[in-house]
Image (cartoon, rainbow, N blue to C red):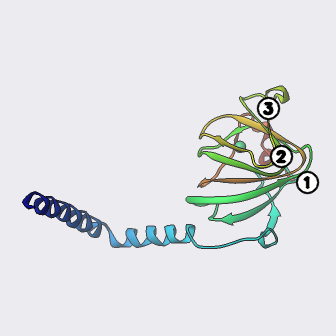
């Protein structure tokens, strides 16, 4: 019994120290972090018709649509987006500074790793398939049929093309 009491007091003391340490931290920063985390973890239920589609960001080839489901891919924190691409849509070899998690919702997505676009090296991903591209891993992709993918990760989400000439942002606007 004595042993148990000692054990409990040790645990309690440890907990008290941890709480004190947390309270010591800059209260301004702490509240900021909390509000950010709350925003990212905000409860919502979205049906397919609740998604707001717009043009995909300029870092992606024209023709794709994007809907933000949760978070903000442009900001620090978790995010989830959906990308709708037409048949034959191609994304040249690129990488992301953060991991990219891809779930195929409909259509067929083809994904290959490496710094050269090579259709013979692509993996066919049908609806329900999932892939993780770790940060910095070079990859390329294309679609067969209109394809919808869900991408989630930790923002800010950026795309860096292996060959700058492939970057749609480098093409002067007409
Ligand atoms: Cu990618």
Determine the image quadrant of residue 121: top right
Percent of width and height locating residue 2: 7, 61
Q: Earlier in the sequence, mark 2 or mark 3?
A: 3
Specify the quarter for ligand 1.
top right
Q: Which residue is mark 2?
A: 171
Q: Nearer the viewer, residue 91 or 85?
A: 85
Judged by depth in the image, the label closer to the viewer, 2 or 3, is 3
Ligand 1 lies under 8 Å from the Cβ of mark 3: no
Percent of width and height locating residue 163: 75, 34
> 10 Å neighbourhood of mark 2: few (<14), some, or many (≥20)?
few
Instruction: Kindly identify the residue that appears in the image at 26 percent across and 67 percent down.
Output: 19
Instruction: Kindly identify the residue that appears in the image at 72 percent across and 29 percent down.
Output: 115
Q: Are marks 1 and 2 in contact (CB under 8 Å)?
A: no
Q: Which residue is mark 3?
A: 122
Percent of width and height locating residue 51: 78, 69
Residue found at the very far left of the displayed protein:
2
Q: Is residue 107 visible?
A: yes
Q: Are marks 2 and 3 in contact (CB under 8 Å)?
A: no
* C-alpha distance separating marks 1 and 3: 33 Å
In the rendered picture of this protein, how many numbered marks are placed on residues?
3
Q: Which residue is mark 1?
A: 174
- Quarter that holds the N terminus: bottom left
Q: Earlier in the sequence, mark 1 or mark 3?
A: 3
Residue 79 lies left or right of residue 85; in this view the side is left
> 10 Å neighbourhood of mark 1: few (<14), some, or many (≥20)?
few
- Quarter that holds the C terminus: bottom right
Residue found at the very far front of the displayed protein:
1
Q: Nearer the viewer, residue 81 or 166?
A: 81
Determine the image quadrant of residue 141: top right
Q: Is residue 136 above or below residue 73?
A: above
């Amino acid at each position: 019994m004595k042993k148990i009491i000692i054990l409990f007091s040790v645990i309690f003391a440890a907990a008290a120290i941890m709480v004190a340490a947390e309270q010591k931290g800059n209260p301004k920063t702490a509240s900021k972090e909390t509000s950010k985390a709350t925003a990212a973890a905000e409860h919502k239920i979205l049906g397919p018709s609740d998604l707001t589609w717009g043009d995909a960001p300029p870092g992606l080839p024209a023709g794709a649509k994007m809907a933000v489901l949760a978070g903000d891919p442009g900001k620090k924190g978790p995010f989830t987006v959906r990308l709708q691409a037409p048949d034959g849509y191609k994304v040249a070899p690129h990488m992301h500074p953060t991991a990219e998690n891809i779930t195929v919702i409909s259509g067929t997505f083809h994904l290959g790793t490496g710094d050269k676009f090579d259709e013979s090296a692509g993996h066919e991903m049908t609806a329900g398939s999932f892939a993780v591209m770790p940060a910095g891993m070079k990859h390329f992709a294309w679609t067969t049929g209109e394809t919808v993918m869900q991408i989630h990760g930790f923002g800010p989400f950026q795309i860096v093309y292996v060959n700058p000439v492939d970057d749609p942002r480098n093409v002067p606007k007409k």
